[in-house]
Image (cartoon, rainbow, N blue to C red):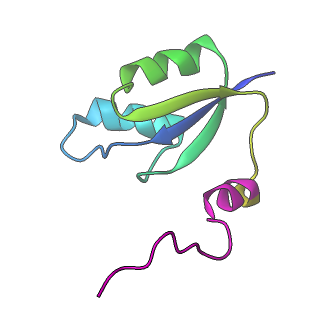
Amino acid sequence: MSYFRITLHRSAIGLPQRTRGVLAALGLRKRCQTVFQPVTPDSAGMIMKVKELVIVKEVAQPLTTKELRAERRPEPGFWVERAVPR
């Protein structure tokens, strides 16, 4: 079964209550929050209502909270590409 990976990219401040209700029905509350919804005509219709506000990808399985957190974490250490002249 495949899933939609939905990330709220734009804020819903100042939008109509109906649009905010669609975001709440999808489970999105904060910017940059990611949720996984099964691929159904219902969830696809809700996504189309707020397509300007979200980023959607189709994935094979949902990620856990720990996997999402690890995905956002940068690699350890740092690289100095070139010294800054002073």
Name the residue at the left extreme: 14
Q: Residue at x 33, y 28 (%)?
A: 52
Q: Residue at x 59, y 75 (%)?
A: 78
Q: What's drawn in magenta, residue-wise?
A: 67-86
User: In the visual, does 79 lie left or right of 67?
Assistant: left
Q: Position of residue 30 (x, y in %)?
A: 43, 54
The residue lying furthest to the top in this view is 41
Extreme residue in the bottom direction = 86
Closest to the observer, 24 or 63: 63
Residue drawn at x 61%, y 58% is 72
Main SS category, magenta section:
loop
Q: Is residue 67 left or right of residue 50?
A: right
Which percent across, then down, holds residue 12?
Answer: 29, 43
Residue 22 in magenta?
no
Number of numbered discs visible in the structure rendering:
0
For image coordinates 54% across by 35% down, the residue present is 6
